[in-house]
Amino acid sequence: MAAHVDDLAAARTRGLTTFYVHRPHEYGGLFVPPATDPAAALTVSSFKDLADRL
């Protein structure tokens, strides 16, 4: 697990499976991160959603 899209990309280059948790308020509304990471194995909207799906 990583906190940002670029960290996930680096993890994938090392052969790890990645999951993206969309956190639209991460930057206090100054910047909205992408809603999805198309390269991630799974994109979810919360850590609870991730836990439920795992």
Image (cartoon, grey):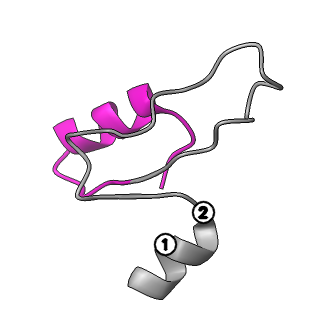
Q: Secondary structure at mark 1?
A: helix
Left or right of 31 in this view: 22: left
Q: Nearer the viewer, residue 17 or 35?
A: 35
How far apart are the two marked residues, 2 and 1, measured between alpha carbons?
6 Å
> Where residue 32 is drawn, which disc sits there?
none
Q: Nearer the viewer, residue 6 or 51?
A: 51
Residue 5 is at least partly visible in this image: yes
| Residue 7 highlighted magenta (yes or no) | yes
Q: Secondary structure at mark 2?
A: loop
Left or right of 32 in this view: 5: left
> Where residue 46 is drawn, which disc sits there?
2
| Residue 5 highlighted magenta (yes or no) | yes
Residue 42 position (above or below residue 8): below
First to last magenta residue range: 1-19
Tag 1: Cα neighbours inside 10 Å, few (<14), some, or many (≥20)? some
Residue 54 is at least partly visible in this image: no
Percent of width and height locating residue 15: 16, 50
Residue 9 position (above or below residue 20): above
Q: For the point 49% across and 72% down, which residue is it?
A: 50
Q: Tell me the kind of residue under disc 2.
A: Ser
Q: For the point 57% across and 41% down, which residue is it?
A: 3
| Label 2–label 1 contact, CB within 8 A | yes
The quadrant holding residue 31 is top right
Percent of width and height locating residue 54: 39, 84
Q: For the point 83% across and 26% down, which residue is it?
A: 28
Q: Tell me the kind of residue under disc 1.
A: Leu
Residue identified by numbered label 1: 50
Tag 2: Cα neighbours inside 10 Å, few (<14), some, or many (≥20)? few
